[in-house]
Image (spheres, rainbow, N blue to C red):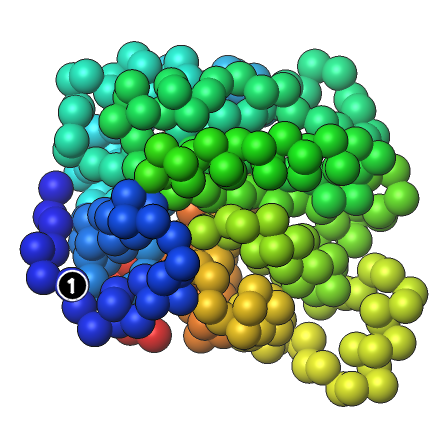
Amino acid sequence: MSFESATSPRVKEILSWYSSENAGVLTNLRRLLCSGNLAGTGKMVILPVDQGFEHGPARSFAQNPAGYDPLYHFQLAIEAGCNAYAAPLGFLTAGAAEFAGEIPLILKVNNSDSLRGDPNPCPALTSSVQDALELGCVAIGYTIYPGSAQRNEMYGILRELTREAKDAGLAVVVWSYARGEELSQEGETATDVIAYAAHIAAQLGAHIIKVKPPTDTLEVGAAKKVYEAESIPTATLKDRTKHVIQSTFNGRRITIFSGGATKGDAEVLEEIRGLSEGGSFGSIVGRNAFQRPKAEALKLLADIMEIHKSN
Ligand code: FBP
């Protein structure tokens, strides 16, 4: 793994936004920012592989059967020069010893399956801070669904887990996906909703926030009035991303965007360009990486990293 031993001025600046955290948390944030091909740039590309749990094995891995093997994802993330690899307990446990220390790991400590359609989802706690420590992880990852009738329970659990993770010197990554019976499907990625979901994650103490790319629509009536009155631009992905970044403490929290369902290279890269020009700190790309044959995935991830590096 490439790892920077000197801290670049940009990484120092980013870490200064977290200066009230303890040395353990800062060290682990630094590890994330100083590993892989983007080390030192202040940008990150993370490989997340929790889709087997979230969507099921065939939907996740049949397209590229190498992905049924947990070791494949460690190799892919390491060879691609990702900043980190994130997965639930089972996948991490299967390879954490073999690849010990080769790439920063993030343990996804809650998960939902999709066998029961739930309009107001609440993921199960599937592992712990202690598991993360034993696996040598730099961070825990936790999903919240703002908009779900069960959101307050998720926020309460995250509050306790965040306290525990920080006490252990681990960073906290929050997947913030608005979802619930009062939100339209289109509204889950509306610009006002994504900005709101990202802000909630920041207020809950997340060090790194992960949201979906915002689309050119507004969902909540009261917010829509303000966007219109204040002429907040939402026409381009660059504009929308800028607004999401502004909503996460005026850019003082690392906010990254997910890749979504598998699509063509050109479409992926065009989206990454818009996100990157809008100030995204990077990407967390799962299906668009592990559902491609390895050589194609490595090429696409390298192109994604180049775009982030150039902005
Ligand atoms: P992808 O790049 O495959 O979209 O991965 C990002 C991610 O957050 C995964 O961690 C997660 O499994 C998935 O998206 C969830 O997507 P959704 O909830 O929309 O099905």
Look at the picture and state if 201 lies above or below 89: below
Percent x, y for residue 39? 20, 57
Residue drawn at the location 53% of the way across and 43% of the way down: 174
* Amino acid at circle 1: Thr
Find residue 240 and report its image quarter.
bottom right
Look at the picture and state if 262 lies above or below 206: above
| Residue for badge 1 | 7
Quadrant placement of the N terminus: top left
Percent x, y for residue 131? 38, 18
Note whether residue 291 is visible: no
* Drawn side of residue 161 relative to residue 306, left or right: right
Viewer-side residue, 267 vs 27: 27
Note whether residue 214 is visible: yes
Quadrant placement of the C terminus: bottom left
Label 1 environment density (alpha carbons within 10 Å; few <14, some 14–19, many ≥20): some
Find residue 67 and report its image quarter.
top left
Residue drawn at the location 60% of the way across and 49% of the way down: 204
User: How many numbered discs?
Assistant: 1
Viewer-side residue, 76 vs 37: 37
Q: Residue furthest left?
A: 5
Residue drawn at the location 79% of the way across and 53% of the way down: 187
Residue drawn at the location 27% of the way across and 49% of the way down: 23
Q: What element carries label 1?
A: loop
Look at the picture and state if 65 lies above or below 164: above
Asked whether mark 1 lies closer than 8 Å to ligand 1, one says no
Find residue 192 and report its image quarter.
bottom right
Percent x, y for residue 60? 49, 24
* Drawn side of residue 63 relative to residue 115, left or right: left
Percent x, y for residue 124? 63, 20
* Drawn side of residue 32 relative to residue 183, left or right: left
